[in-house]
Image (cartoon, grey):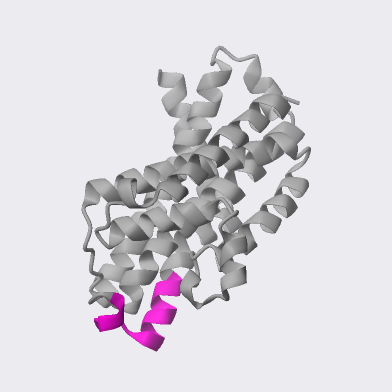
Amino acid sequence: MRGLVRLIWVEFLLQLREPFAAFFALAFPPLLVLLFGSIYGNEPKPELGGLGTIDVAVSGYVGMVIATVAVFNLPISLAGYRERGILRRLAVTPLSPFAVFLAHLVSLALLTICGILLLVLVAKVGYHLRFLGSLSSAIAAGALGGITLFSVGFALAALAPTARTAQVTSMLLFYPMLFLSGMALPREILPERIQRVATFLPATPVVTLLRAAWENTAWWRNEPHALLALALWTIGSLAVAAWRFRWE
């Protein structure tokens, strides 16, 4: 247990020392809040159900934090470890393979939580963020979305032979999700044809559940299609990860 805790702490510090990962997980979403908050403000609008622009946008930014860590940090770091032989050396230590993956997953989950807390803090202090839902509902939606996106990240890590390949593959998936899934822009402003295409992206149901939880909608009852999409992405990604993952 002591070795596992130490490995988790080391992994977490390594994530913070990576400029690209730390910036997009911790700094980029709060910067978006400050940018769009300074442009549009956060006054309540009737067409938004009494919420402001930032209130509506933050649920998507939470999805952005989760997707950044899961789709960028996880596959790039794991593929880099495999490329440098670190995974092979860890495989022969007293820690089990399960413990190695658990440490990596927990460290990334801690980074995700830190990013979400910083995002919410900036929005609350700067623009009096409003939250209409229940905390337990939002946490459950975020946890389900995190499981799905982290599963996708493990699949990408299993498929990518090098860290450079993982980075390119992650970008090819992340940027369409960023602009089409509702993370950076509301899906409602997109053409209907593009919205239909976006439903096939793994982050779309995640943002759907997060926004429903934020607006106090019973997503577990009213969003069956999003829940089905999450289940399919999770099962498929884990199957690919188990099939293709190699220690070296």
Q: How far across and how far down the image is residue 56, in percent?
A: 35, 70
Q: How far across and how far down the image is residue 109, in percent?
A: 44, 41
In this view, 111 is above or below 128? above
Q: Which residues are magenta?
A: 31-48
Give the quarter of the figure containing the N terminus.
top left
Q: Residue lying furthest top in this view? A: 94
Which residue is at 65% across, 37% downward? 155
Position of 64 compared to 51: left or right?
A: right
Q: Is residue 32 magenta?
A: yes
Position of 111 compared to 21: left or right?
A: left
Task: Name the main secondary structure of what is drawn in magenta.
Answer: helix
Is residue 70 or residue 80 the one in the foreground?
70
In this view, 87 is above or below 110? above
Which image quadrant for residue 36? bottom left
Which residue is at 47% across, 53% downward? 205
Is residue 240 or residue 1 the one in the foreground?
240
Q: Is residue 45 visible?
A: no
In this view, 122 is above or below 44? above
Q: How far across and how far down the image is residue 237, in percent?
A: 61, 36
Which residue is at 30% across, 55% downward? 213
Q: Is residue 245 magenta?
A: no
Which image quadrant for residue 210? bottom left
